[in-house]
Amino acid sequence: MKKSELFFSAIQVPIDFLMLVLAAVTAFKIRDYPQIIAQLPKLYQFPFDTYLQIVLMVVPLFLIIYAIEGLYVIRATRKFLRETLKVFTATSVGFLIIIVAIFLKQEWFSSRFVILSAWLIGTVYVVFARLLLEQIQKYLLVKRHIGAHNLVLIGRNGKIKEIEQIMLHDPRMGYQIVGHLENASVHDLKQLREEVDIDEVILCDQTATDAEQEKLVDYCTIHNITFQYIPTTFQASRFEIKMLNGEPIIQVRPTPLDGWGKILKRTFDIVGATVLIILFSPVMLVTTLAIWLETGMPIIYRNERVGGDGKKFRVLKFRYMKQAYCTDPNTPEGRKAIELEKELIANQSVRKGPLYKIKDDPRKTRVGSFIERYSIDEFPQFFNVLKGDMSLVGPRPHQEREVEKYKEYHRRLLTIRPGITGMAQVSGRSDLDFEDEYVLDVFYIESWSLWLDIQICLKTAKVLMKGRRNNS
């Protein structure tokens, strides 16, 4: 652990203490300003000295709750929004305890205005102080490398190279790469450690034997080096240990989306899709009008896709192509449109693997280019979710001709309902290679939780604001 991280985590405690006391004093003092609370007369006269004594006794309770909530994590790369939510939650819990105590002990301090205002002001003060401290810490991290963790990468595949590029271009992640070893060799790691300090190791080498990995773990443990590894798809699976005839047996759980998990996800889909249809109904009405004015009918394009358990369904989208290219494939015009699409895929696709993504697609209308850029064309899929063909979050729904190019293991993507958004969309959208998209989707299937769905939906909103690339 870095000394700077220890220092900032240690100083966070007295700063939180000071902010909470300052918030309590502010809440007490603003009662003396009639301009602020002209309609709220003082029902209780309470000496400030006595009030301050109570505050000094109560504030340590908040610090304990903050610690339980994980607000004193010793790391420079904390997520501010997540930390703000934790501050609000922990502060609310603390004031709830105070309200219960006041209810049980009526003769104690009973000004509801002071209590409620101290709760709000306290949250703001603590969040502001933490933001200021975070900015100082991030400045030292990025500009001076103070608090950066010296990292060694081990492996020679695409994943480890991708991690290296991400860390090199984003120093705010808190890492400084000091070495890159191709093999899981303890001897090479020892030699490197003689030249530079090493704080962490990340291993991504599927060829490393169990013996080599065990030696690496032992060496890192002995020398206080944090050891991490990027697992294979199988290693990342969820396991459940059972007993069979007195012997331990490990069962691989393909997904938590079974039983109550399935019910919970479906409930979330129905409620979420209903809310989104109501929320975006004005946008959908304007889009309908814009498409009709530019190129007439039809407004909705129904495209056959393969869904959960390999069942076919028709995904609904706003038509973003010219009418001539959205015809029945069994007609001469439709077959001609398919031939043109094959030609465009061969010459202008920017994706690798079974899927395609056509850059500079000449078939799009002006309205179509705009609505696809911001994924407005996918809004009708909320009705697919209500019907049960799709989910709000899940793997992409693929065409049958794309599924035919799957390798056998790719069919894991068909074990759950496809989604309007998913891990791939918030991690790179259509720019990801299919194999990278597959890994993300499998991680989602194996690690599903309702909170993960909520996080992906929130991140999707942020991604949509930027628009798609390779979409001219």
Image (cartoon, rainbow, N blue to C red):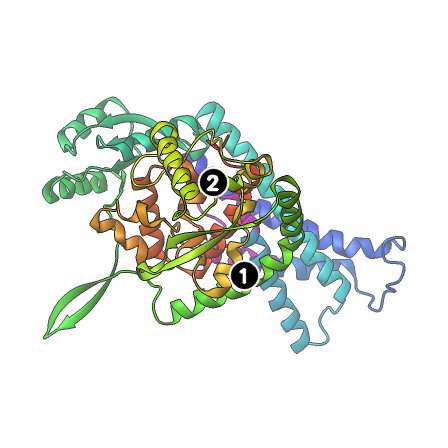
- The residue labelled by disc 2 is 325
Point out which mark residue 316 bears.
none
Q: How many marks?
A: 2
Instruction: Give coordinates of residue 135: x percent, y percent.
Output: 56, 34
Question: In the visual, does 114 lie left or right of 150?
Answer: right
One can see residue 233 in this view: yes
Most foreground residue, 182 or 211? 182
Q: Is residue 433 above or below residue 20?
A: above
The crowd level at tag 1 (other Cα within 10 Å; few <14, some 14-19, many 20+) is some
Query: Which tag, 1 or 2, sits closer to the chain's start?
Result: 1
Q: Is residue 244 above or below residue 312?
A: below
Q: Is residue 68 magenta?
A: yes
Segment colored magenta: 59-84
**In terms of secondary structure, where does tag 2 sit?**
helix
Q: Is residue 37 above or below residue 399?
A: below
Q: Does the magenta stretch include residue 235?
A: no
- The residue labelled by disc 1 is 272
Question: For residue 51, which quarter of the picture?
Answer: bottom right
Instruction: Give coordinates of residue 15: x percent, y percent.
Output: 59, 44
Instruction: Give coordinates of residue 460: x percent, y percent.
Output: 51, 46
Q: Can you tell which of label 1 and label 2 is closer to the viewer?
A: 2
